[in-house]
Amino acid sequence: MKIKGITLAIASVFATSSLYADVFDPLTNDLTLPNNIYNTAPANLLTIQLSTLIAAGECEIDNNGVEDYSGCTLDDVNNDIDGNDKFKPEIKVHFTADDFLDDSQTTNATLRQRGGYSRFAPQKSYRLKLDSKDTLWRNERKLQLNKHPWDVTRVRNKLSFDLMKGIPHLPSLNSQFVKLNIDNVSHGIYTHIESMGKEYLNQRGWDSNSGLYKAKSFSFSERSDYDLDAQGKPLDKDAFERHIEIKRGKDHRKFVEMLAAVNDHANNFQTDVLDKYFNRNNYLSWMAVNILTGNLDVSHSNFYLYNPKGTDDFYFLPWDYDDTWGIQDQPDNVADGTIWDKNQFNPQHLWSSKFHQRFLKQPNALDLLTEAVTKIKNDHFSAQKIQTLLNRYATVISSRIKDENEPDFYELPTTATENDPDSVIRDQYDLVYSQLAGRLQENYDRFIAEKESPMPFDLNTPTFTNGNINLTWDAAFDPQGDAVRYDLDISTTPDFQNGTIKVSIKDILTHSYSAHWEHPAGQYYYRVVSRDSGNHWQNSNESYVENKGEDDEIIYINAFDFTAPQGTPLTSYSNLITLGSIVYNGDLSEWSNLQSFNTDPADISGLSGSEVDWRRAWMGHDVNGNIYFASQYDNTINMTWGHITYMDTDQNRNTGFIGGASNFPIGVEYMIQGYRLWKYTGNGTSWSWAPVTELWRSWHGTNSEMTTPVANIGNPTGINVFFEGNNHPYGNGLASDFYPNDAMSAGQYFTYLLTQ
């Protein structure tokens, strides 16, 4: 077993709650970098001139897969919006720059479009590749000219890589602001980001034949797409690269071997995965940087893996940091209703990846990560350092970007319309730019506040059997090992607005729920929220996308859509309760898996905030002759006589109280008002009651629990029941909430059976 420089005193990072004196203690396989690989000069603006050469020919891939780009134009390049197909038109160009003089060649490079989703933006990003392998620009052959069309500041990527230049265990990338002219037409401001390939490895003194992989849709899962031949080459390279692109290396057996170890849950993660195939310092640094930058797009893409030739080691390398530094709060994203859920921030953001999930399940992994995040924040990512960089950038590019005569100005992602003055664009640019430095503390504070939240989980498709709806979801992992409970809602709308929620269950102890389905056939949505004992909460991974038309969609977080059959009314039920299982503390967790009456909609809006608005009620009994009542309300309880339970204990409407206007659906023998039990003594329509007893009770928040011996209500075998919320005590005397809602209008009620 390879220990890699860990001393005996600290050999097991996860074995105890005591952490390192320095979280980044040296390891024998730490990455080493030359001292002079980064450009440390103050930010400046480099002018690049390109002249295109258009020749006679085609711009296509023919039926035999033969590529012919000899006749492609710049328009063909700009119209290449699908970055995943084989058609990659490129054109010949002549390249010069402030620091790359004219070589007198007709052409000396090729130009093609680059990027993924950014291809749909009006302004394109480009890859420029020099023809010569020897005459390079700043020791680079490929120039990656990024427009970053969704970043109004156009500095987030460069800011991130400039900050990373001081981090020992995480190699950064050189970057450069560029003013690009093509055929003497200005295309505005770009950011060149160093390409990861042969030259990248050579500059760092690493073997250029090493494995280098770019994650595209990669979760560290084993796949048949990664099958190799005897020499370690993919049997189907296209299938392989749908998930992770091979940038360097010819033998990928070590990559497949590493994946097998990650997915072997019978092994020891620390010794057989983390220590054997990775470098802890590198991994923690990469994780910490993503947390501090607030990177929203790194769970399955936008990172590289580097496997030095002849070693077991894989290192995380950073890539693409334009979805960072609070981009979710840009005015255009807010106005568009773009939603980033809390589980899209690290470390919860990484939970769906096999390797990250196994790390985060280790004891004290979050403590270790917290130490790494704090150290990098304090040592390398200070707000003052960020502001200094931003001030330098502003002097170089901001005045150009905010100039209405420059190509970038009207393409900035703002909320400005054609009818707005140009000042709206400038004001939004300045606002977002001024907020960047403060995002560091916001990202750190969010991590500290949310790190103990349960991890996100998946919801499963509901099933319907024997008149019941059956819901299951994956168990939510809690980093501290706290017990997790679940809140469930079923609604007719994906936004779960008041009045649309048909089922609402709190404090479910298992990750499943089954109950009688009584609602009409149609489209429904369900959501589940997990909560731990510290009231940290988490949504599921699910989301529902509503398409409103071309380029117009609404994303509803934590909403799973399903189609339900026609339900049937629940006429009766029974809960035989194990003696002692109900604890009177106003916590309804013991009731979560017991059958309840259906969910009542939120339909009372009052003056004081404590009006009676029934949501859900349970009844139960035990073999020792006790009957139990539990209730949940939409408002905080202020227990008064306005909480009324009407019980027909002989199940005969011709006996008992039928209402002053003969309008009750049942004949009531017993009534609970607040926590007092009363027996009817009138003639059927007169209000006449005799006190019986006070019930044992407890209430807290929106919950109440009560119990009394069954003998106090005459030892019935069945009870017809309905509930009233009389809101007169709360100054809302005209509002009564009947449960079921149509108790008075259609004579509906519930039935409870006291069966053994």
Image (cartoon, grey):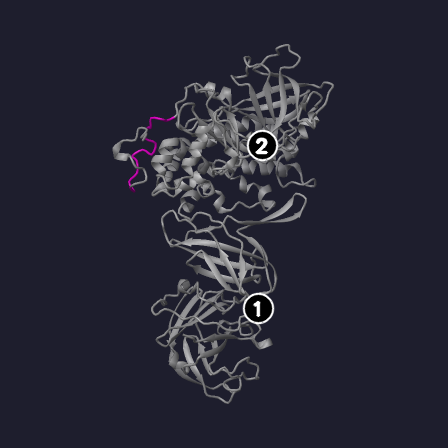
199 shown above or below 442: above
Residue under numbered circle 1: 568
Frontmost residue, 12 versus 530: 12
Residue under numbered circle 2: 148
Q: Which mark is residue 405?
A: none
Frontmost residue, 230 versus 236: 230
The amino acid type of the residue labelled 2 equals: His
Disc 2 secondary structure class: loop
The amino acid type of the residue labelled 1 equals: Thr
Q: CA distance from mark 1 to mark 2?
A: 55 Å
Quarter holding the C terminus is bottom left
Q: Which residues are magenta?
A: 16-30
Is the stretch drawn in magenta largely helix, strand or loop?
A: loop
Q: Is residue 27 magenta?
A: yes
Disc 1 secondary structure class: loop
Residue appearing at x 36%, y 50% in the figure:
481
Judged from this view, the residue extending furthest toward the left is 9
Q: Does residue 40 appear in this view?
A: no
Quarter holding the N terminus is top left
